[in-house]
Image (cartoon, helix red, strand yellow):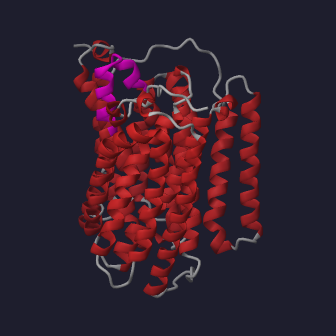
Amino acid sequence: MSAEALARPGGRPGPKMALLAFCMLIFSIDYNIVYVALPEIGREVGFSAQSLQWVVSAYSVGLGGALLLGGRAVDRLGARRMLVLSLGLYGIASIAGGLATDPGLLVAARVVQGLGGALLFPATLSLINTSFEEGPVRNKAYAVWGTAGASGAIIGSLVGGLLTNYLGWAWVFFVNVPLCVLAVVGCYAWLAPDAISGDSRKFDIPGALLATAASTLLVFGLINGPEAGWGSTQTLTTIALGLVLGAAFFAIEAKTNDPLAPPRLFGYRGLLTAILIIFVFQGAINTLHYLFFIQLQDVLGYSPLEAGLAFLPMSAVAMLGSSKLLPAVVKRWGVRGALFSGLIGVGASMIVLSLTMSTNASFWPLLPGVLLWGLFAGMIYPAMFMAAGSDAAPDEQGVASGLTQTSAQIGGAVGMALLIAVANAGLDLSEGASNPIGDVVDGLQLSALVGGIAAIAGAFLAFRIKSQKAAEQAAPDAVTEATPERETAHSA
C-alpha cells in the first residue's frame, strides 16, 4: 500500500497510529527523562544549586515560546515536513547535549530540543485529524496518542534511572538519537508527502520572537534573582524588559492581520480560565518533580535507578486518575468540579510531601503524598484542555490548545523558578559552598508548602466556568480518550 493510501482517512490505520504514538512518546520521554539525572548533571557539568533548574526550564522556554509559530508552520508548510524537521532537531540537540562539558552548551541544547517539541506536538495532532476518519477510528488514535504521552513519564523516569546509573547522565540525551532515526524512517514510509499550500500569508515572526524573548528574560531574571540580588540592576532590568516585550507582543497581536494568538480568544471564559489554571498547575508540578528527585538522591542517598523506580507509583496512579477518576467527576460535577478538585488535590499532595520530607526518613513516608499527587495530576490535565476548547469554534481548536500548552510551558518555568528560589533562600549558593542537609530539607519543605498553598488558591479560578449539568458534559469515553472535539456545553 502506498504512503498516500496509508495517509488517507479510511486507509490502513495501524502503522500511522503506531508512528504518531511513537513520536508522542519521544516528546514525553525527552521532557521527563532528565529529572532523574539532574543531580549527576549538576555535579559533572558544573551547574550551581540555583542554575540547575535551567536544564528543565530551557526546554520549557523553547517549547512554550515557539508552540504558536510551530502550529502555523504545520498548517502552511506541511505536517509531515515539520514532523521530520522536529525529529531532526531533537536528534542533533541530543547529541550536543550529551557531549556538553559546560552549562551553557547543555542549556542551549535543551532550548533546541524545546523548539523541536514545538513542531512535533502540533504536527502529530494535525496528522491525527487529517489521517483518520472522524468517529471511533480517530478517537482510538487520540487514545493511543494520549496513552503514549502518559507512558513517557513512566518510561522516562525508569529508563533515565537505568541509563544514568549504568552509563552516565549523557545517555539520557544520546538515547533520543536512534529513536528519532526510527521515527523519521517511519514518516517517509507511512505518511504521504505534504500537499503544497496556496496560502501566501506570512508568519507572525515578530510575535513569535517577542513571545520567546519575553518569556526567556522573565525566567532568566527569576532564576538569577537569588544569586544576583532581587534588587540588583541586572535582575530588575531583565524582568522589566521581559514584561515590556510581553506587552509589545500583545500590542502587535492586536494589529497584525494574521496573529499567532488572535486577541478575541482571550475573551473566551473557558479558554482564559484553562490558561490561568494550567499556568499554576504546571508550575506546581514541575517544582514537585524537581523537589522529589533532589529529596531522594541528595538527601536520602538514592541512586538514579532507585529514584526512577520510586517515581513509578505516581505515574501508575496518574493513569488511573485520567482514565477512571476524571470521567466520574466530570459526569457528576462537570469540568468545573474536575478543575477545582484536581488542583485542590495537587496542592494537598504538595503539603503532605512537605510534612513527610526529612533527613532520616525512607521513601515510604513520602508514598501517601506521591500517590495523592499522581491521582489528582492525572485527573486535572485532560480537564484543562476540555475547558480550553469549550467555547472555541471548530477552526479555533488548534490555536486554543496551542495557547493552553504555551501557558503550561511558561508557567512551569516561571513557577519552578519562584519555588526553587524559595527552596534555596536559606542556603549558601556561592561556588564550592557546602550546606547542611538539614538546611536543604528545610528549603525543600518550605518550597513544597508554598507551592501547595498556591495550587489550592489557584483552584478557585475554576469557578469562572459556569456550572454544567452532568447530562451536558462530554461522554466519559471522550474524556478518557482526550479527543479534541468541542464540549457540548459552553461557558458563560
Quarter of the image for residue 203 reads top right
Quadrant position of the N terminus in the picture? top left
Query: What residue is drawn where x is 72% and y is 22%?
Result: 257
In the image, residue 142 lies in the stretch drawn in magenta: yes
Query: What residue is drawn where x is 38% and y is 57%?
Result: 98
In the image, residue 479 lies in the stretch drawn in magenta: no
Quarter of the image for residue 399 reads top right
- The answer to whether residue 52 is above or below residue 440 is above
- The answer to whether residue 205 is above or below residue 304 is above
Quadrant position of the C terminus in the picture? top right
- The number of numbered badges drawn on the structure is 0
- Give coordinates of residue 415: x percent, y percent: 56, 59
- The answer to whether residue 17 is above or below residue 193 is below
Q: Please name whichever residue, 266 or 173, is drawn nearer the observer in this view of the structure.
A: 266
Q: Please name whichever residue, 41 or 156, is drawn nearer the observer in this view of the structure.
A: 156
Q: Which residues are magenta?
A: 126-146
From where the camera sits, is residue 73 visible?
Answer: no
Main SS category, magenta section: helix
- Give coordinates of residue 488: x percent, y percent: 47, 25
Q: 68 left or right of 337?
A: right
From where the camera sits, is residue 439 visible?
Answer: yes
- Give coordinates of residue 52: x percent, y percent: 49, 67
Quarter of the image for residue 269 reads top right
Query: What residue is drawn where x is 29% and y is 44%?
Result: 324
Q: Please name whichever residue, 164 or 344, is drawn nearer the observer in this view of the structure.
A: 344
- Give coordinates of residue 50: x percent, y percent: 55, 71
Q: 260 left or right of 115?
A: right
- The answer to whether residue 191 is above or below residue 179 is above
